[in-house]
Amino acid sequence: MNDEQKIDIPIKADTETTINTETDTKSKYSIEYLKKIVAASKTSNKVKIQYNQDYPLNLEYKQIDKYVLRFILAPRVEND
């Protein structure tokens, strides 16, 4: 069974975007690493984001016929 869903959301520059889903999903990622990864957004006007609860975050920046930058970031683990 594949739980993957796909959605394309056009986002205008200088706008705030909210994405609502049918199910609640929570994951925690290091803000320090996210800041470094998001800096790559200057290289592309499209980003593909994939994540699931307690699974790695995948971000992909793509310039057609030029390059693909793909980042995988493990979620933070909380000790009980």
Image (cartoon, rainbow, N blue to C red):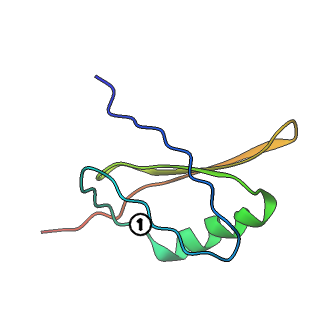
**Is 38 rendered above or below residue 62?**
below
Where residue 40 appears, x then y in whole percent? 72, 63
Circle 1 sits in a helix, a strand or a loop, which is it? Answer: loop
The relative height of residue 64 versus residue 29 in the rendered view (above or below) is above
Residue 18 in the image: state x and y as whole percent.
45, 67
Question: Farthest residue toward the top?
Answer: 1
Q: Residue at image x 68%, y 77%? A: 14
22 with respect to 35 (left or right): left
- The outermost residue toward the left is 80
The quadrant the C terminus occupies is: bottom left
**8 left or right of 51?**
right
Q: Quarter-wise, where is residue 26 in the image?
A: bottom left
**Residue highlighted by disc 1:** 29
Tell me the amino acid under the disc marked 1.
Tyr
- Residue ID at (43%, 60%): 19
Q: Residue at x 54, y 69 (%)?
A: 34
x and y, in percent, of residue 44 in the image: 77, 56
